[in-house]
Amino acid sequence: MIPPRFRSKDHAGAGLLILMGIAVASAGRSYRVGTLTLMGAGYIPTVLGVLLVAVGVLLGLTANRAAQPTLAVSLGHSPAAIDVRSWGFILGGIAAFVLLGEYGGFVPATFACVFISSLGDRQNSLRDALLLASVLVIAGYLIFCWGLKLQLEPFKWG
């Protein structure tokens, strides 16, 4: 039985973040970690795992118990509790990223993923989705292709 003070959605999310962070950091430690100037294969997973744990702890400490519904209510099995539209758009965005990443390149895959997924939020308009997708494509290109010089093909033909 979960104590009443740990029954909010925020506490459940914090617990999941902490568990995932521990798992990721443990997996990263099985590889050579190295140093900041000479990173090994396990450096990034270890750092990200530790950051996940830290975010989970902060979320758990700052969760507002009174304002959140209990975990039992938020995880109710009512058919109305599942937002099929949002899930459809999010899964569609992931599918578009996979397909366009293989056949279209980084730019169209990222644009389609962000645009389609952002339509899952009922408060987003088409203009908002287009703007968000455009800004993230430009930022992604500048960071990964231009800044970090990763070998990502911005566009693929064929």
Image: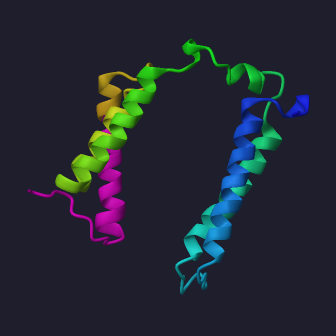
* Colour scheme shown: rainbow
Indicate the quadrant where residue 45 lies. bottom right
Instruction: Provide residue 69's location: percent of width, then percent of height.
Output: 75, 20
Q: Is residue 37 above or below residue 16?
A: below
Rendering coords of residue 150 (x, y %): 32, 70
Is residue 121 visible from the viewing direction of this image? no
Q: Quick one: quadrant of the C terminus?
A: bottom left
Which is more toward the observer, 128 or 27? 27
> Which residue is at the front of the view, 124 or 91?
91
| Residue under the point 83% across and 22% down | 66
The residue depicted at 61 percent of the width and 63 percent of the height is 48
Which x, y percent locates residue 123? 44, 20
The spot of residue 32 in percent (x, y) is 59, 84
Residue shown at the point (32%, 35%) measured from the top left: 115
Instruction: Using the image as rendered, state which of residue 25 and residue 68 is in the foreground.
Output: 25
Q: Is residue 80 magenta?
A: no
- The quarter of the rendered structure image containing the N terminus is top right
* Stretch of the chain drawn in magenta: 131-158
User: In the drawing, does residue 84 fall left or right of residue 81?
Assistant: left
Q: Is residue 128 visible?
A: yes
